[in-house]
Structure formats: structure tokens, C-alpha cells
Image (spheres, rainbow, N blue to C red):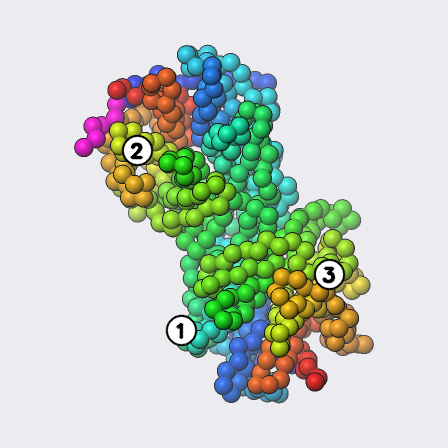
Amino acid sequence: MIFNPSEHGLEFDCSDFAQSPQTLVFEDFVRVYFSTRKRDSGGQYVSVVVFVDFDKEFKHIINYSKDEVIPLGQIGTFDEHGIFPFHPLRVNDHIMAYTCGWSRRISVPVETSTGLAISNDGGITFTKYGNGPILTSSLSEPFLVGDSFVIYEEGTYHMWYIYGKKWFLDTEFNIPERVYKIGYAYSGDGINWKKSNLKGLIPDLIGENECQALPTVIKIGNTYHMYFCYRNATDFRMNFNRSYRLGYAYTEDINNWIRDDKSSGIEFSESDWDSQMMCYPHICKVDDQIFLLYNGNMFGKLGFGLAELSE
Amino acid sequence: MIAPFKWQKLGQVFNPTEIKDRAFLKEFAQAPSTIIFDDFVRVYFSCRPAPDANSQYINYSAFVDFDRSNFFSILRVSETPILELGDLGTFDEFGTYPVSVIKVGNEFFAYYGGWTRCYSVPFNVNIGIAISRDDGKSFTRIGDGPVLSYTKDEPFILSSPKIRIFNGKFYLFYIAGKKWIIDEDKPEPVYRIRMAVSEDGNNWTKIERDLISVVIEEDEAQASPDVFFMNGLFHMFFCYRHSKNYRNGERGYRIGYASSRDLFNWKRDDLKAGISVSTVGWDSESISYPHIFTMDGNIYMIYLGNQVGKFGFGIAKLVM
């Protein structure tokens, strides 16, 4: 564990939750954005995005954001009730971010879509590209689009994201639960996206109700490596046999992914902050070292940790 | 120069509160649109069962068939809604309204607004497509999701679809929400008329701008953009209202008019619409949701009266 929000006196009211750490690498430090939570006027949680800067070996914290890096949306918009996760990306000195905006529903708890935001001050604050999303529901992806992760190479932007497949009533607990899967879209400008609509992109390991989230991809040599997290659709909050763990897949051609969780090279701890749950992975390269950041037990309530790739 | 239109009101032709044996059709007959058959005119409209215990409504769409030679002769009313509501969590779980139907070959395509319920605002709407292969009596959605969804500058409420084909291309006129404003602690949406173009009716390119300027206030809301071609020009009838306190008749819906040579650039001139509220009767407080159709050499406008169709719709004939 490298960051526990309860141990840091941040200037914003944030002592719980540091979810989905995602990095932007600068010349002499690494900025880690994450979502923390505050209470809205009705007492409900909303996720907001802040950052913490580490030295390039993740040994010391050298700076914090003074405020939320991006405001939540206006009434009725897709990101009115939270932004989580937040994916920063630098392309040719431009810093942007793909956001996952949350808005509350009545028959189901939430709907999400992907938004875009731009930073003109080196990643300290971000301005929204419009009040609406850039990637959202469509004919065969009817709801819950989010968790976008983007890489740019040779004029093409590649996005892996998640989309909802179904909502259903969990009759044991009498609550609506959802199933979501990883999808792929591509773009020439990072703004206008074409969904591949490929279904079953990442094969299920625990059945059709497997929920797949937060894909993160790195290309090494000719191979794309993806980490993500997955869980059962029901009874996953307290039953740790059914909760989030990390999955792994690889491909050489973007479209045909081979799932191989056994090769992920990372396991639960015996008895520590990541002994019951591992989720929201983020893979990054700092100088020549590859790191994996992730959340542990309780969906990241306690903070996030770091693993280093051994050669 | 286009002469002002002149409409002869023929009267109210359908009042949903007079239909007694349809549980899904208790109140309202909104957003009418027509398909002309050999010997009858089918008018699709949207209706509501009685509200639930929390006074909340769901919306269905249905149809009524009129004798082609006599709009005061109802041949039949659909016995079920033309389309079921969507599954849990889908965009059209709580309503399918409004609907605009077009015949393509032997199939009928219905473009409709799907309603979901939200937490901070009462609802959101997205546009979906359903297809009928039984002469427009029942429809099946082509997917669980919407066909036209939210984008950068169209962040919510994509609704009021009107589908037309001109010169082999599909044109979808619709509205997109601009903002929610608070009127006496209640959120009210502001929306404007937009357009998207398609080669196949499924894959759409939005033109991403408002088509019609505002006249009564900056937050004017506009709906029901129905377009037809006549005498070398495209003509659009639509409805518009004030942003607040619009349930009062004076600030409620009126019918506006605009014309265009190219479908992209529109000149608004409401004085030419040629139709307004009556001094007394079913359409004396507001008129809205115009739909234009041509039949047997005549041009007709079908439209809603008081309380946005709570008591149904009437018809007017263009005086040529």
C-alpha cells in the first residue's frame, strides 16, 4: 500500500476511498489521479477526482491537489453524481482525460457514460468538452458505458471500456444487479469514436454473469497486455469468494484476446489490505520500470497499492 | 415569398377519455402521426394508463383508424399498445412516447422516445427504433439500446422524433435538451429542434446545431418539428412554449412555422403558421404537436389541444 487516505490530511474532506489510481508521468514525478468520496446535500456519496504526486520510485509523496481537478456536472447531466474512474492521457504535450460520469436512476441505482476533459495547466484542473458524453449507450450496448482506457499509437486512438449487458433482480437480496463486459472502440482524433461492437472480446472465466471492469493495457514488443478486474454479478460485496480479483489477457492484433489469468503474476496477500479483494488495476511505465497500481479490500476504501514488474 | 398558410379547423376527432375499455388508454392522446392506408388513415399517438400510487405515469403508444373519407368516423382503436416497455434499466423502461412511423418497403419503422426515470430530474429520453411486419399493428424494438443517444452538446432528452425521407435520404428531426431550469423547486427542461441524416435509417449523423431560432425568450422550448415539401420549399411546423409556468394557457404551447430551401438553413416566421388557439373549446388554451400529412389532394394538420393532449387531438385542413 502506498496511499491510505485516512493517514493524509488532505485539504478537501477525504478520509475514505482512493479508488482507481491512474497515472500521468512527468519529468521528475508521477501524478496519480484517483476518485475519493464526499457527501452531497442529501447525505449521499458522490465521487470526485483529486491527485497525489509521487517521486518516480513511488517512495515519497511530494504534492497533493488543492481541490477537485474537475467539477461534477450540472443538473440532469451524465456526470452529475460522480466521476469515477478518471483516466488521464498525454498525447503530443496535450493533457486530456476520459471520465466515467455517474447519474442516479430510480429503478436501478445508476447510469454511466464516458466524457472527455482537457487540461491547460499541466493536469491540475480539467475543463469538460461539452456537457454531454463522448461515448454512451447504443443499440447493442444499452447502458453503463464507462471505465474508458485509451492508448495512442501512430495516429490511432484505441479505447477499451465497459458496457452494460443486463440489469436483473437479485431475488436473494431483492436488489437490481448488473452485468458488464469489456468492449473496444477506435478513433482518429480521440473525440469521435467508432465502437467495434465485438461481443465476448475478453472471454468469461466464471460464466456469462461475470462482470468485467477497468481494463488497462500496455504494449510491450508486439504484444498488448491487459489487466482488468472481474467479479460475480451477485453477492460480491461481502462474500470475498465472489468479489473482485484481477484478470489478465493478451493479444498481438487488438481484436483476438487470449485470456490467461494464471499468467497475471499477482495474487491476493495472505492477510493484508489486499487479501480479500483486488480491483481497479492501472498499469504504467515510469522510465524503464513497469508498475501496477490497484485497489484492495472494500473497493479501495482504504487506499491503493503498488506492485513492480520483476524482469 | 410564401403566402401565409390558412387552416380551416375541422374539429376534435379523438378524445381518449371517451375510450372506456382500454386500461392502457385512460388519459392523453399525444404526438399524433399518420400512415395512409387504402381505405383508412391510421393515427399513431401516445397515451397513459391511470397514474400509479405515487401519481407517476407511464406512456404507451397506440393507434386509431379513421375512415379515409370521414375523420369523424372511428373504425377501430388498437387493443394493445403497439410496443411493450423496455426491460429493467433500459432507456425505454417507463415509456415509449412520442412515436413517428414511416413505411419502408413492406416494413414499418417506428422512431420513438424511450423514457427512463432519474433521481435529480424526473426523467430522461433517448430515441429508439422498432419495426412492424404486420402492417403497423405491433412493433418490436431492434435492440435494447437507443439508436440516437447523447453527445457533447446534446446531453439529455433526445425526443420528439419526426422521421421523413427526402430524395432517398432519411431525415430525423428531433429535440435535444439544453438545460434543466428550476421553476418553483421543480426542474423543467429546455429543449430545441435538431436534425440528423442517414442513408439507411439506422446509422445517423447529427448536424449538431439548433435548427430554429427562438422568439419568445432565451429559454424557449420547442418540440414536434414536422417537415414537408411543397412548391419548391421545405416547410416545418413545430410547437414552442415558455420555460416556466407554461401549464398556464397564455405561456403554453403555440404552433410555429419555418421554411427552408435545403433542410439545413431555416427561416422562422410564426405569423405564417396560420393556426392558433380557438376562443372557446378543446383547443382554446394551447395547441401543440402538429403533424402534417397529404391525402387525396388535400393537406391536413393534426394537432393537440388543451393540456398537451389530455383530451386528445383535432384536425385542420389547409385552405389552398
Q: Which mark is residue A231?
A: 3
> In the rendered structure, which amino acid carries the disc numbered 3?
Arg
Q: Quadrant of the C terminus of chain B?
A: top left
Marks 3 and 1, the one that precedes in the sequence: 1
Q: Are marks 3 and 1 in contact (CB under 8 Å)?
A: no
From the viewer's perspective, tell me whether residue B305 is left or right of residue A55: left
Q: Is residue B138 magenta?
A: no
Disc 2 or disc 1, which is closer to the eye?
2
> In the rendered structure, which amino acid carries the disc numbered 1?
Asn
Callout 2 and callout 1 share a chain = no
Magenta extent = B1-6
**Location of mark 1 (residue):** A120
> In the rendered structure, which amino acid carries the disc numbered 2?
His
Does residue B280 appear in the picture of this structure?
Answer: no
From the viewer's perspective, tell me whether residue B96 is left or right of residue A174: left
For residue B2, which quarter of the picture? top left
Residue A220 lies, in percent from the top left, at 62, 77
From the viewer's perspective, tell me whether residue B238 is left or right of residue B88: left
Q: Residue at x 58, y 39 (%)?
A: B142
Q: Which mark is residue B146?
A: none
Disc 3 or disc 2, which is closer to the eye?
2
Element carrying mark 2: strand
Q: Residues within 10 Å of mark 1 (few under 14, many from 20)?
A: few
Q: Residue at x 64, y 80 (%)?
A: A291
Residue A18 lies, in percent from the top left, at 61, 72
| 3D distance between C-alphas at marks 2 and 1 | 45 Å
Q: Residue at x 59, y 42 (%)?
A: B143
For residue A107, which quarter of the picture? top right
Residue B217 lies, in percent from the top left, at 29, 44
Q: Is residue A4 above or below residue A144?
A: below
